[in-house]
Image (cartoon, helix red, strand yellow):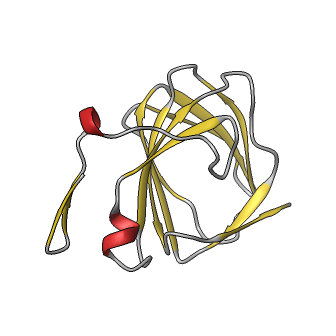
């Protein structure tokens, strides 16, 4: 990861995915945005580590959360909306506090997620 005077460049070839993030069935690649913005903005790529696991209903307390599907598909159940299938090229803004659960996903799912702030509270719903 190149970081010169707060410019940050993250290359896939020199990056790595790590478990231990918010959901154990995902691996996360930190893009370094949180570090250079003092935690105001977070950005990472998420990919499936356990194809059979899903996420139970939960909420997030944050100012902004956007997901963009890079590869594969995922189905969420959103409070007041119902089931929504997001596929490669789909983008979703998830408002703070909206209850949602992951119903299913493809084995090759990859998501770009951008949040404000980088660290935020998640609660079971």
Q: Quadrant of residue 74?
A: top right
Q: In the rendered image of this protein, does residue 104 appear above or below residue 3? A: above
Q: In the rendered image of this protein, does residue 69 appear above or below residue 71? A: below
96 left or right of 68?
Answer: right
Q: Nearer the viewer, residue 30 or 90?
A: 30
Q: Position of residue 107 (x, y in %)?
A: 57, 19
112 left or right of 117?
Answer: left
Q: Nearer the viewer, residue 84 or 108?
A: 108
Q: Position of residue 5 (x, y in %)?
A: 14, 74
User: Image point 20% across, 73% down: which residue?
Assistant: 6
Q: Quadrant of residue 98?
A: bottom right
> How many numbered callouts?
0
34 left or right of 2?
Answer: right
User: Image point 53% across, 41% down: which residue?
Assistant: 18
Q: Position of residue 101 (x, y in %)?
A: 75, 46
User: Image point 30% across, 73% down: which residue?
Assistant: 36
Q: Quadrant of residue 8?
A: bottom left
Q: Nearer the viewer, residue 9 or 97?
A: 9
């Amino acid at each position: 990861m190149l970081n010169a005077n707060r410019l940050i460049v993250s290359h896939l070839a020199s990056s790595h995915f790590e478990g231990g993030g918010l959901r154990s069935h995902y691996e996360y690649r930190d893009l370094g945005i949180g570090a250079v913005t003092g935690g105001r903005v977070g950005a990472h790529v998420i990919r499936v580590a356990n194809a059979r696991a899903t996420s139970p209903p939960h909420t997030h307390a944050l100012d902004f959360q956007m997901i963009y599907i890079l590869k594969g598909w995922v189905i969420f159940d959103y409070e007041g909306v119902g089931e929504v299938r997001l596929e490669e090229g789909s983008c979703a803004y998830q408002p703070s506090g909206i209850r949602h659960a992951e119903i299913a996903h493809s084995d090759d799912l990859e998501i770009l997620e951008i949040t404000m702030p980088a660290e935020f509270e998640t609660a079971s719903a």
